[in-house]
Image (tube, coloured by chain):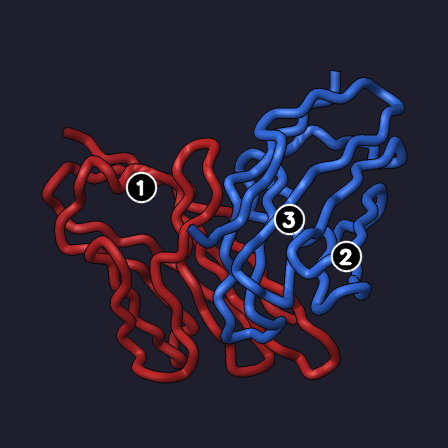
Amino acid sequence: AQSVTQLDSHVSVSEGTPVLLRCNYSSSYSPSLFWYVQHPNKGLQLLLKYTSAATLVKGINGFEAEFKKSETSFHLTKPSAHMSDAAEYFCVVSTYSGGGADGLTFGKGTHLIIQP
Amino acid sequence: DGGITQSPKYLFRKEGQNVTLSCEQNLNHDAMYWYRQDPGQGLRLIYYSQIVNDFQKGDIAEGYSVSREKKESFPLTVTSAQKNPTAFYLCASSIVVQHTDTQYFGPGTRLTVL
């Protein structure tokens, strides 16, 4: 079984300040972890993914995330927020159990608000 | 221009009607997926298909049906048995069904029951 918890349903930051979106996961197996972004009424776009290689993962648009096994966390960060970053962000865990694909388990999302 | 297309963008259904949502991909991916998204919720898996003529139920398959007759197409039918079908539906595909594999998403179809 697997689960993912996004610790904040809403995060508000000022333009130019750092962004931190928090994600904790639970998995019985070595997981793959993803961050996706969704703009209003659009599909999801992959920001970055972790698949057991380097624990610090760099993604698109200046985002990065660090996999911390001891803390079961995969928090998303960006040094300086831009107005175009305003969107919904989903943390996702995926585990192949061996008995069939589990698909992706999504967090409930964090709504990122950027103040001018 | 590779990608996933979903149609229609908006769909309205009367009570008791079946409706079919289209999903097409030209990425040559073997695996395809259907998700449902409700406000304030993450995505929940309805069905997925690893290969042509094969599909598996996800977490919330009741009231839905799918087919996979062609590699590039994975239509979803929302039947009258689905009690609360109003939602945003997202189709995705990946090279194979593997936990390291990235899923690529279509733009979605918003279904509203009148």
Q: Quick one: SS at disc 1?
A: strand
Q: Is residue A7 visible?
A: no
A22 or A34: nearer the eye? Answer: A34
Q: Amino acid at mark 2?
A: Arg
Colour of chain A as rendered: red
Label 2 sits on residue: B68
For label 2, the crowd category at 10 Å Cα-Cα, with few meaning under 14, some 14 to 19 and many 20 or more, is some
Q: Which mark is residue B35?
A: 3
Q: In which quadrant of the rendered view does residue B59 lie?
A: bottom right
State yes or no: discs 2 and 1 in contact (Cβ < 8 Å).
no
Q: Amino acid at mark 3?
A: Tyr
Judged left or right of residue B31, residue A80 is left
Q: Quick one: SS at disc 2?
A: loop
- Residue drawn at x 80%, y 18% is B14
Q: Which mark is residue A11?
A: 1
- Residue drawn at x 85%, y 42% is B63
Image location (x, y in percent) of residue A2: 60, 69
Mark 3 or 2, which is nearer the eye?
2
- Residue drawn at x 66%, y 79% is A97
Judged left or right of residue A68, residue B2 is right
Do the residues at pointers 2 and 1 share their chain?
A: no
